[in-house]
Amino acid sequence: MANISSTALARTSPLYDRVKRVIPPPEWAVFAEDVDAILDLKRSRNAVILAHNYQTPEIFHGVADIVGDSLLLAREATKVDADVIVLAGVHFMAETAKLLNPEKTVLIPDLGAGCSLAESITAQDVRLMRQRYPGVPVVTYVNTSAAVKAESDICCTSGNALKVVESLSVERVIMLPDEYLAQNIAAQTNVKIIAWKGHCEVHELFTASDVRQLRENHPDVTILAHPECPPEVVAEADFSGSTAAMSDFVGKQRPPRVVLLTECSMSDNVAVLHPDVEFIRPCNLCPHMKRITLKNIRDALETGQHEVTIDPAIAAPARRAVERMLAI
């Protein structure tokens, strides 16, 4: 075991050089064997790993092939040249990858990796909304099940929601399921937005008083907020945008000190790329994202668990809603 571990440490040392600012050496010593095994398994299984920005650094920077926010992962999933896709994220992301790659094997390392937003609405809820507001198009956040997407006209992400809403050229839309995202988009457009009362259990915890306290404690700090945060938080922040937009902001603006009001691991992953920026971390953990680990990614590649399947009757209309988004 010691020889295997020392070999794994040697093989993975170039990867560790990249993340050593955010992962202490004793932790990497624990991770190295799984990282080494995963790299071998990817080659032998012709597999790729797609990892969301909220994955921990040993996954995001250690074993992932494609990383980013929901929109980027959806786009890149259409270009994957592999037999197997392992989605290091939550279940709706794996479903989206399967929708766009129906002939490929898509695996989710832990079936319990869900999402409070996805669980806040059902396909029946969407049908009832259509009955209440006949003729009003339904824009559905990608943080939803395939069954909900199938009842929708078009999907959106936090990064392209405004563009999607305005592309429809209508006076009002139904926007599901994130109430705060809908309210934050409504503040930027003349389109009337009918919202649902779904919330992200991570972002809804941030408050305007948190922002004011951060400014009091760190007068020179730049505060970035995800648009799933309550509108009063977004109003007090210096910038609001998707995880990709926040990462781009840090890269281009290089604020000396910054706070990302979003899931914890995002700060670690961006910090790896920008060692000259100081990150203040009053973040919240997503319990679903944290169900994905190196160990269960390795298990997924070794055993083929857990394969994501979608009823063809649901897949076809859900795929259309996603593809309409990607076409914009």
Image: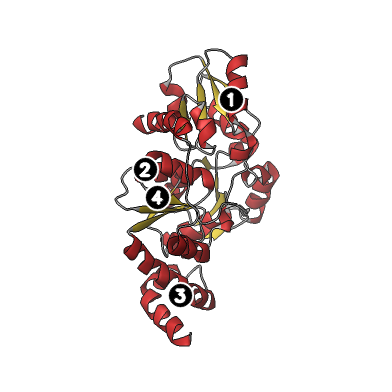
For disc 2, the marked residue is 101
Circles 1 and 4 in contact, beta carbons < 8 Å: no
Picture quadrant where residue 290 is located = bottom right
Asked whether 111 or 65 is in front, the reply is: 111
Q: Amino acid at mark 2?
A: Asn
**Residue behind mark 3:** 33
Marks 2/3: CA distance? 30 Å
Foreground pick, 60 / 240: 60
Residue at the spot 41% in from the left edge and 48% down from the top edge = 248
Cα distance between the residues tagged 3 and 4: 25 Å
* SS under mark 3: helix
* Up/down of 110 relative to 79, above or below: below
Q: Earlier in the sequence, mark 3 or mark 1?
A: 3
How many residues crowd around disc 2 within 10 Å: few (fewer than 14), some, or many (20 or more)? some
Q: Which mark is residue 105?
A: 4
Q: List x then y, in percent, for residue 313.
A: 46, 30
Task: Count neighbours of disc 1 (C-alpha within 10 A) and say few if under 14, some if 14 to 19, many if 20 or more.
Answer: many
Q: Earlier in the sequence, mark 1 or mark 4?
A: 4
- In the rendered image, residue 199, in percent from the top left (x then y), is placed at 64, 38
Q: Which residue is mark 1?
A: 126
Return the disc, 3 or 4, that comes first in the chain's sequence: 3
Q: CA distance from mark 4 to mark 2?
A: 8 Å
The residue under the point 67% across, 42% down is 208
Image x and y of residue 28, in percent: 49, 74
SS of the residue at dot 1?
Answer: helix
The mark that comes first in sequence, 2 or 1, is: 2
Q: State yes or no: discs 3 and 1 in contact (Cβ < 8 Å).
A: no
